[in-house]
Image (cartoon, rainbow, N blue to C red):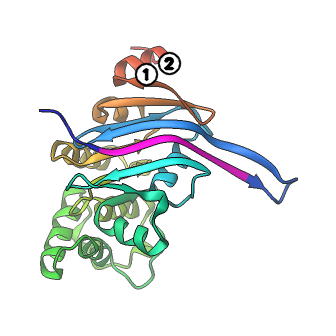
Amino acid sequence: MSRTEVLDVAGLTKSFTLHNIDGRSVVALDGVDLTVKAGEHVALAGSSGAGKSSLLKCVYRTYLPSSGSVVLVDEHGERIDLLSLSEREIVALRGRRLGYVSQFLRSQPRRTALQIVADAAVMRGVVRGDAVAMAEMALNRLRLDRSLWDVHASVLSGGERQRVNLAAGTVSPPRLLLLDEPVSALDPANRVAALDLIGSLTESGVAVLSVFHDLEAMERLASRVVLMRAGRVIEDGPPTEVLQLELGVAR
């Protein structure tokens, strides 16, 4: 059965003006074309500065692209032009259909780990009672000790906060999930649990666009790997093929 398209990026460019230096313009993305389908995990590869995180932020609308189009196809087949949405509309869409998990959890004073994850589920339309139960399941699956659930997230360790962040991003998962180094601070056992969770999302039909510097994670999770260089897509294909031929990974 063919998969339905969820994300369609076409001719995307993004430039930054360095006002604090001499006003020069730096090109971060240069004509990027990319699609992601339901149940597909597309991993972005490439060296630092290739444009991977900039691409994620343009899709999430943290950055406003200079030109091109970013279209999200909803569950009814409606094509939503993310670049034309108002700030209010993009915030509402993020709650329901578009998720983003970075390697950092922004400090949220006076909010516990459980509250943060439950609130994320409520944003996606889950009633409060069910949201709390789902948050507990997510934190348990990511091996966060129950004694930490009612602790303010600001005092947790880096790895603990990263698991809270991943739980919040994946509870009642959105249609499209963007991942930017979501397991970078995790020890081996917790990393395995996190990768298992991410893998189960694509199996359930979630479309995932990710950045991992971990080649093993890309090979394990990705349906396709897109290699970027200087803001452009250089290769797009099966993980083993792209990583071997373009990154020189020895096997």
Q: Is residue 22 left or right of residue 121?
A: right
Instruction: Check residue 234 for magenta coloring.
Output: no
Amino acid identity at mark 1: Leu
Amino acid identity at mark 2: Glu
The quarter in which the C terminus is drawn is top left
Q: Is residue 58 left or right of residue 94?
A: right
Residue 240 in percent (x, y) is at 35, 20
Q: Is residue 30 above or below residue 93?
A: above
Residue 152's image quarter? Answer: bottom left
Residue 141 in percent (x, y) is at 19, 57
Which residue carries the number 2 mark?
246
Query: Residue drawn 29% across and 50% down?
Result: 190
Local packing at callout 1 (Cα closer than 10 Å; few below 14, some 14-19, many 20+) is: many
Residue situated furthest bottom in the rendering: 110
Local packing at callout 2 (Cα closer than 10 Å; few below 14, some 14-19, many 20+) is: few
Query: Residue drawn 46% across and 14% down?
Result: 245
Query: Magenta residues, as a range?
Result: 6-16
Is label 2 in contact with label 1 (beta carbons under 8 Å)? Answer: yes
Residue 20 in percent (x, y) is at 83, 60
The numbered mark at residue 243 is 1
Residue 113 in percent (x, y) is at 32, 73
Q: Main secondary structure of the magenta part?
A: strand
